Amino acid sequence: MPSIDAIHYATNQPMRLTLEDGGIRQISSLPIASPDLPFVAPGLIDLQINGHAGHDLNASPLHGQTLSDLTRSLYPQGVTTFFPTIITNADDAIANNLRAVAAACDREPAVRAAVAGIHLEGPFISPEDGPRGAHSRDHVRPPDWDAFQRWQDASGNRIRILTLSPEWPASPDFIHRCTASGVTVSIGHTAATPDQIRAAVHAGARLSTHLGNGAHLSLPRHPNYIWEQLAQDELWTCVIADGFHLPDQVLKVILKVKGDHTLLVSDAVALAGLPPGPYTTPVGGRVVLTPQGKLHLAENPNLLAGSAQLLPHAINHLTSRGLASFSQAWEMASTRPATLLGLPQSTGLAEHAPADLVLFHRRDNGPIEIQQSYKSGQLAYERPSAS
């Protein structure tokens, strides 16, 4: 049986993981740690990814090969499980993209293993400027159960997360029906009142989508929809911790309030992973990707045009800023989202857990240098040798 010698990402203890049938069969301690041993941690799980390395999940038409290529592009980033995110669009375009994702999962076992579900972000969101973000106003609409069922059928029943705004009058009943069908409802792109937020939570909403983003530039001091989501103990909270979407003070407050119910997402777009420079995109038009990883509108550097960083960057940001310990930050992007969604990866590095693993070096508490990624016990990525 294959085995891996490495240092536990949280305890710093040397260990040997014996793999069998896609899982961790046994974990044993090692008496001495070799100086070149890598760290080992659970594979990263991204609940919201729109694209990466030029692969755009919201292109029209979406080809199944896009998802295959995207899956392979994420392994070098330590992402072993993800939720392809389809955003607001015309009804047929949403259905066609969902079918393309489903077809790729049906066709390729490797894709099927990596895709734990689909995140449908919209179109039941706020029509207001600010909360709507970059979503097309033309296709924003109230919650519609029949339309959602058609999309769920097109996806092969793979929609697991739905982002909506509960400001629509029929939202509570719709949220209840989604929750009863096994879909996790997330509040996002919203201009809802505090009462509407509370009604959504009572109906079963359990998550906030990139809290603090997709919002008005100015809000009432109190009450407002951000305070209310923070105050709802039943809500888990996703944040984009790339250093651009939220200031450190806001991240610190969210982490203090939400604690173990804070999750990291990338919300990465197709330009993530591409070289810095100017680009033209279907949604944002002329944009610029800076060497620091900020993606902004060409005409206004203060306006973001999406996220261009993956989860390791967010982990580094939280750790380097002293906002979280390394193990806490890693778990925000691995075992915690698995716990929320009821995935088997929630047990992390434990015997009988899935062997979704990331091996990496991190010298002097610096950036993460991923060496290998394993999916279901199989080597999915290995860093090229320097020689």
Image (cartoon, rainbow, N blue to C red):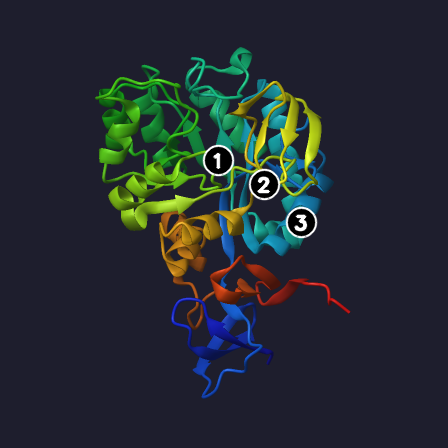
Tag 2 secondary structure: loop
Q: Report which residue position mark 2 lands on.
A: 292
Tag 1 secondary structure: loop
Amino acid type, mark 3: Ser
Q: Is residue 21 above or below residue 102?
A: below
Task: Find out whether the residues at labels 1 and 3 contact each other: C-beta distance under 8 Å.
Answer: no
**Can you tell which quarter of the image residue 239 is in?**
top left
Q: In the image, which disc is placed on residue 379?
A: none
Q: Report which residue position mark 1 lands on.
A: 244
Amino acid type, mark 2: Gln
Of callouts 1 and 2, the N-terminal one: 1
Residue 134 x %, y %: 53, 21
Q: Report which residue position mark 3 lands on.
A: 73
Residue 82 x %, y %: 54, 47
Q: Is 7 or 341 nearer to us in this picture? A: 7
Residue shown at the point (32%, 33%) measured from the top left: 205
Q: Quadrant of the C terminus?
A: bottom right
Residue 355 seen in the figure:
no
Mark 3 or mark 2, whichever is nearer to me: 2
Mark 1, Cα crowd under 10 Å, few <14 / some 14-19 / many 20+, is: some
Using the numbered discs, state the Cα–Cα distance from disc 1 to disc 2 in whole angstroms: 10 Å
**Can you tell which quarter of the image residue 102 is in?**
top right
